[in-house]
Image (cartoon, rainbow, N blue to C red):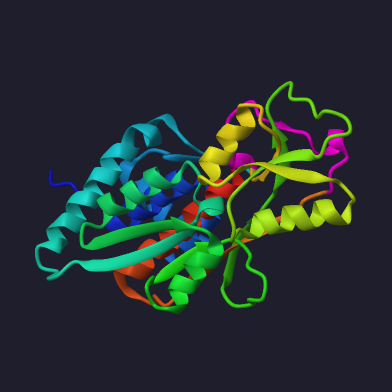
Amino acid sequence: MTQRPLDLDAVHAFVRIAELGSFTLAADAMRTTQAAVSLKLKRLEDRLGCRLIERTPRYVQLSARGAAFLDHARELLVVHDRALALFAGARQRLTIGISDHVAGPELPMLIARMNAQDPRLVIEIRIGSSADLLQSFDRRELDTVIVRMHAGRSDGNVLTDEDFSWFAAPGWQHRLGEPLPLATMAEPCGVRALAGQLLDAAGVPWTEIFVGGGVAAVAAAVMAGLGVAALAPRMVPFGAVDVGAKLGLPDLPRLPVLLHTRVKEGRARDALDALSAAFKSAVRG
């Protein structure tokens, strides 16, 4: 007996839910409603005769059958997109600037997955400070930027916001009477400026002990015991300690992640929506 083919839209919904861990984020990535995503998944589960996703009020998790199906589902979508690419003409290019304070350790995996899922799209990434990336965006050198806050600008769409804390290496001790040693990004960096302003307002003397090299280098300097840094928790290696309360440092606010783009539709917009949803998922942990 001939079996009915799988619904590719339903397969796509399943993959998005599995990757993002959320029906809401999957709906955002697919530019549809949560109800529509749920319906697509149910249609796929009914077709396969098994539950792929376990749902509870607190989490979304793959079932054993869902975990076994996930790689095959991804391969099916990749083959489908490659077949379409034969008739799609020239590949479309999308240049994205991402703030170093936003990118995080997930970025290479996210970009690799985007490239694999749509071979008709060439994605170029630039990493830098939010201020520099926004200038490049304004000069139309970048199609899109995903950045942290930037003083003096009120444009851009807020994707999410994220906790920041003062981190140090386990066992690190601040020597009494000495300025607080900070590891920071180089100028221009909005997080660096904010940290300095808050410390000054709280009357905490400080000095920069390590400057520049990117967030990964700043985190490495922290873990080497050079000093303290204002970072998002997902940016620091396992074992780093939040020392803000212990040292009496001022609270850091939640900082937004902002999207600025001129991309409105098509494959590039689909990829951008998926990337935006993935960042929301990464921030949520």
Residue sitting at the far top = 171
Please report the bounds of the magenta region as a residue range.
233-250
- Residue 225 percent location from the top left of the image: 66, 27
Above or below, comparing residue 12 to residue 1 in the picture:
below
Question: Is any atom of residue 60 visible in this view?
Answer: no
Which quadrant of the structure image shows residue 198? bottom right
- Residue 130 percent location from the top left of the image: 54, 63
Q: Observer-nearest residue: 97 or 129?
A: 129
Q: Quadrant of the C terminus?
A: top right
Q: How many marks?
A: 0
Answer whether residue 160 is magenta in the image.
no
Above or below, comparing residue 22 to residue 72 in the picture:
below
- Residue 59 percent location from the top left of the image: 59, 41
Above or below, comparing residue 28 to residue 44 in the picture:
below
Query: Would you say 135 lies left or right of 221 here?
Result: left
Question: Is any atom of residue 172 visible in this view?
Answer: yes
Residue sitting at the far left = 86
Answer whether residue 247 is magenta in the image.
yes
Q: Quadrant of the N terminus?
A: top left
Query: Would you say 38 lies left or right of 12 here?
Result: right
Q: Residue at x 34, y 54 (%)?
A: 12
Q: Observer-nearest residue: 187 or 38?
A: 187
Q: Residue at x 79, y 44 (%)?
A: 206
Which quadrant of the structure image shows residue 189? bottom right
- Residue 70 percent location from the top left of the image: 34, 39
Q: Residue at x 21, y 57 (%)?
A: 119
Q: Residue at x 38, y 38 (%)?
A: 50
